[in-house]
C-alpha cells in the first residue's frame, strides 16, 4: 500500500491518486475505496464548481449598459454630448476639432494638412466631403473610380491622409460610425496614416443603442455603390443602402509586445474628428 495516499472515514468513499498498475477499486473492511486518476479528480472538481453556480434568482442584477434615465434636454444637448464625446475620444488618443461653420472646417483642416506636409489625400465620394475638400489648393485629391470595389491597397498606401464621413458620433465611447459600402470606403478607414473624420453636430448620439434604429433601417435598400450614384444620391450619408458599418474608436492601437502601447500598427496612427455645426 506504499503507492497509495488517501484518507477515509468509516463508511465513506475516498478519492485518491493511484499508480496505473493498481486496481481501480477495492474493499477493505467497512471502507470502500474508489481509486481515480488525476484527470478524473480535476474534472470532478470542475463539475462540482459548475453545479455550485447560483441560479438566475440569486445572480446580481444586470448592469444597465446604456442608461436611459436622463431625459432632461440638458443631458442630450449637442454641447453636453460633444463634451462627453471629446473626453472619451481623448482617452483613446483621438483628437477633436470643433468648427462652427464649414468655412472654419475648411481652414482648420487645411492648416493641419500643411502641418503634416500632406501632398496626396484620398477621400470618399460624398458631396459634403467634396464641398470641404474642393477648397484645398495645391493638394492632389484621390477619389474612388467608377468601380470603387476595385480599389488598390498598394495605391492607397501612397496617400498621406484619408478623409471620411461619420454617419454618427457615439458620445459614451468617443466612437465614429462609418458607412463603408465599398472596398474603397473600407480601405480609406485603415490604410492612410492620418484619418480625417468629418461629422455634423446633429449626428451626435448618446450611445450605440440610440443610433441603432437608424443604422438598422439603413441596412436594406438599393445596392448601387458606384461613385456617381453615391455622389448624386447621398448628400450627407442618409440614403438607405446595404453595406458595412464600421465603428472606429481612436487611432489604431496595440500592446501585444511586452504590453507597450503602440499607435498606428494596424491602421491610422492619428485620427482627427472635425465636429461641424
Image: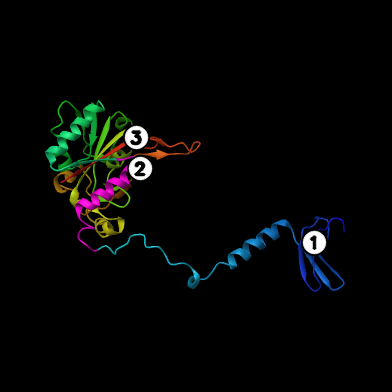
User: 104 left or right of 168?
Assistant: left
* Disc 3 target residue: 269
Using the numbered discs, state the Cα–Cα distance from disc 2 to disc 1 in whole angstroms: 55 Å
Q: What element does badge 2 sit on?
A: loop
**Circle on res. 92:** 2
Near mark 1 (Cα within 10 A), the count class, few <14, some 14-19 or many ≥20, is few
Q: Which mark is residue 6?
A: 1
Q: Nearer the viewer, residue 275 or 18?
A: 275
Q: Position of residue 246 (x, y in %)?
A: 31, 47
Spot occupied by residue 194 in the image (x, y as percentages of width and height): 29, 34
Q: Earlier in the sequence, mark 1 or mark 3?
A: 1
On screen, 185 above or below 238?
Answer: above
Q: Nearer the viewer, residue 107 or 91?
A: 91
- Magenta stretch bounds: 71-94
Task: Assign a secondary structure to mark 3.
Answer: loop
- Percent across and percent down for residue 81 are 24, 52
Q: Is residue 84 above or below residue 147?
A: below
Amino acid at each position: 500500500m506504499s503507492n497509495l495516499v488517501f484518507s477515509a472515514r468509516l463508511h465513506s468513499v475516498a478519492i485518491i491518486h493511484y499508480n496505473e498498475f493498481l486496481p481501480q477499486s477495492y474493499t477493505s473492511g467497512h471502507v470502500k475505496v474508489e481509486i481515480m486518476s488525476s484527470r478524473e479528480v480535476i474534472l470532478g472538481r470542475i463539475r462540482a464548481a459548475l453545479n455550485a453556480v447560483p441560479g438566475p434568482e440569486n445572480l446580481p442584477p444586470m448592469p444597465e449598459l446604456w442608461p436611459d434615465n436622463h431625459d432632461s434636454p440638458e443631458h442630450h444637448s449637442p454641447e453636453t454630448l460633444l463634451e462627453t464625446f471629446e473626453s472619451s475620444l481623448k482617452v483613446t488618443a483621438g483628437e477633436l476639432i470643433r468648427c462652427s461653420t464649414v468655412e472654419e472646417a475648411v481652414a482648420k483642416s487645411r492648416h493641419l494638412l500643411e502641418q503634416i506636409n500632406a501632398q496626396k489625400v484620398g477621400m470618399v465620394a460624398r458631396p459634403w466631403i467634396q464641398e470641404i475638400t474642393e477648397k484645398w489648393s495645391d493638394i492632389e485629391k484621390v477619389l474612388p473610380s467608377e468601380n470603387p470595389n476595385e480599389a488598390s491597397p498598394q495605391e492607397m498606401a501612397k496617400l498621406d491622409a484619408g478623409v471620411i464621413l461619420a454617419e454618427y458620433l457615439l458620445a459614451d465611447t468617443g466612437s465614429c460610425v462609418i458607412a463603408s459600402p465599398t472596398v474603397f470606403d473600407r480601405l480609406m478607414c485603415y490604410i492612410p496614416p492620418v484619418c480625417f473624420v468629418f461629422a455634423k453636430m446633429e449626428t451626435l448620439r448618446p450611445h450605440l443603442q440610440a443610433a441603432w434604429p437608424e443604422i438598422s433601417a439603413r441596412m436594406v435598400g438599393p445596392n448601387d455603390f458606384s461613385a456617381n450614384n453615391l455622389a448624386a444620391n447621398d448628400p450627407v450619408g442618409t440614403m438607405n443602402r446595404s453595406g458595412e458599418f464600421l465603428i472606429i474608436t481612436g487611432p489604431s492601437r496595440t500592446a501585444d509586445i511586452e504590453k507597450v502601447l503602440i499607435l498606428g500598427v494596424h491602421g491610422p496612427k492619428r485620427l482627427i474628428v472635425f465636429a461641424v455645426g
